[in-house]
Image (cartoon, rainbow, N blue to C red):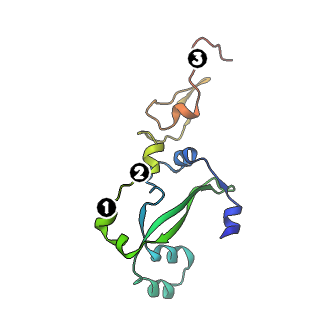
Amino acid sequence: MRDLLMANEEVNPSIWAACAGVTSVEPLQGTVIYFPQGHVEQCTNSDQVRTLCAQLPASTYRISSVSYLADTRTDEVYMHLILNVCRPEERNTATVATAARPEPVAKLLLPTGFIKVLERDDIDGDQCSIDKACLWGGFVFPQRKPSVKHP
């Protein structure tokens, strides 16, 4: 696993969130439920192993570390989480629900908007028009200055 992380690069969380799109990310010390079946589906094609693991119980974990990463070959973004098993008293849903938790990372980083793939129709001569509601449009492209003559 360490070699896999070394082959990929850590990314600024704001840039990661822009690439990942609108997603919910639990904060550090947030509580998540881990389903082992998801790992089994990703790791093996064996129906026998999947059948054996289908009845594994879900477990409650607390997020102790988050790394925002990108695959350098494909530019896909993903997260590496380190999870710690919750103590029995923390597994109670009432305890988890009433615990003070900060805002999820995605809510802090992403404004309300949408992501748009630029098409040929979006470019008119030497100008590119992007709707202001488009997510990160003003961040990625600088504001046009009408007084400056463009070639």
Q: State the CA–CA distance, disc 1 to disc 2.
A: 13 Å
What secondary structure is found at the residue carrying circle 3? loop
The one nearer the camera, 132 or 119, is 132
Q: Which residue is mark 2?
A: 102
Q: Amino acid at mark 2?
A: Pro
Q: Which residue is mark 1?
A: 97
Q: Earlier in the sequence, mark 1 or mark 3?
A: 1
Vertical order, 38 against 113 (above or below): below
Disc sitting over residue 145 in the figure: 3
Residue 91 percent across, percent down from the top left: 36, 72
Residue 87 percent across, percent down from the top left: 41, 74
What secondary structure is found at the residue carrying circle 2? loop
Report the residue at 53% width, 45% height from top: 18
| Residue extending farthest left | 94
Camera-side mark, 1 or 3: 1
Residue 118 percent across, percent down from the top left: 54, 37
Q: Is residue 94 left or right of residue 17?
A: left
Report the residue at 34% width, 59% height from top: 99
Q: Quadrant of the C terminus?
A: top right
Vertical order, 81 against 22 (above or below): below
What secondary structure is found at the residue carrying circle 1? helix
Q: State the CA–CA distance, disc 3 to disc 2.
A: 39 Å
Q: Amino acid at mark 1?
A: Ala
Report the residue at 58% width, 30% height from top: 141
Looking at the image, do the residues carrying marks 1 and 2 touch, with CB atoms under 8 Å apart? no
